[in-house]
Image (cartoon, coloured by chain):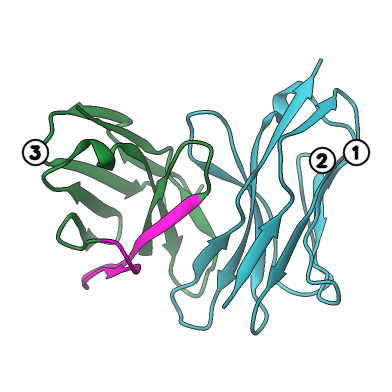
Amino acid sequence: GNSVTQMEGPVTLSEEAFLTINCTYTATGYPSLFWYVQYPGEGLQLLLKATKADDKGSNKGFEATYRKETTSFHLEKGSVQVSDSAVYFCALSEGASGTYKYIFGTGTRLKVLA
Amino acid sequence: GAVVSQHPSWVICKSGTSVKIECRSLDFQATTMFWYRQFPKKSLMLMATSNEGSKATYEQGVEKDKFLINHASLTLSTLTVTSAHPEDSSFYICSARAGQGGETQYFGPGTRLLVL
């Protein structure tokens, strides 16, 4: 079945450091891919998405490119801020059944120190 | 746009009582809504998928008589935890997907349930 694998956290960085959170997937067909962010005690917020191979999603300085050849969708940011501290979830959308259920990764906790 | 609300944001109840959680899409019509459960420091576990006007589809291992889901309109879905027990304590999150083939899910802020 379809699955999403994220790098284990927590990830601790200093402010202005470069961020990479790895995400790889296995899927039949061509799923859409998403990154969501969850701040403490809150629901998930859509960060960015990509719907087909070679698409690049970007938002708030974060970027991720849909790489079909490596089945990856790694999240990057050039210079993190303390306010980026949160849990980041990678997800794919299963469209074949028509319900577009998500398969989530386990989440990666990011802590940015001032 | 694409705002989803949940009510209540937190609830404390006694064991054996039932609790209803509402999920509303505020500025779009949601043909499909999803209910998730999240344990501390864990990922989201999909409980069920509900389509407006039809019965919910539950994931394997989720008791449909325990977690009643109703999706009576295109903007409202409810989750009722019946005869709640302490092991039902959790963070419940809903999401909504607009119609017309859109895949993106928009999430509510979550409801924290504590059963004493």
Q: Are marks 1 and 2 in contact (CB under 8 Å)?
A: yes
Which numbered marker is on residue B16? 3
Say which chain is cyan: A
Q: Position of residue B46 (x, y in %)?
A: 41, 59
User: Is residue A18 toward the left or the right of residue B1 in the image?
Assistant: right
Secondary structure type for disc 3 = loop
Residue A46 shows up from this direction = yes
**Colour displayed for chain B in the image of the structure:** green
Which residue bears the numbered disc 1? A78
Secondary structure of residue under mark 1 = loop
Q: Is residue A94 left or right of residue B27?
A: right
Quadrant (top left, top right, bottom left, bottom right) of the C terminus of chain B: top left
Instruction: Report crowding for label 1: few under 14, some 14 to 19, many 20 or more residues within 10 A (C-alpha).
Output: few
Residue B63 in picture, x, y percent from top left? 22, 61
Position of A32 relative to A77 (above/below): below
| Residue type, numbered disc 3 | Gly
Q: Amino acid at mark 1?
A: Gly
Real-space Cα separation, disc 1 to disc 2, in angstroms: 7 Å
Task: Quadrant for residue B62, please give it.
Answer: bottom left
The residues bearing labels 2 and 3 have C-alpha atoms spaced at a distance of 48 Å
Q: Residue furthest front?
A: B87
x then y, percent, for residue B70:
20, 59
Residues in magenta, as a range: B44-62
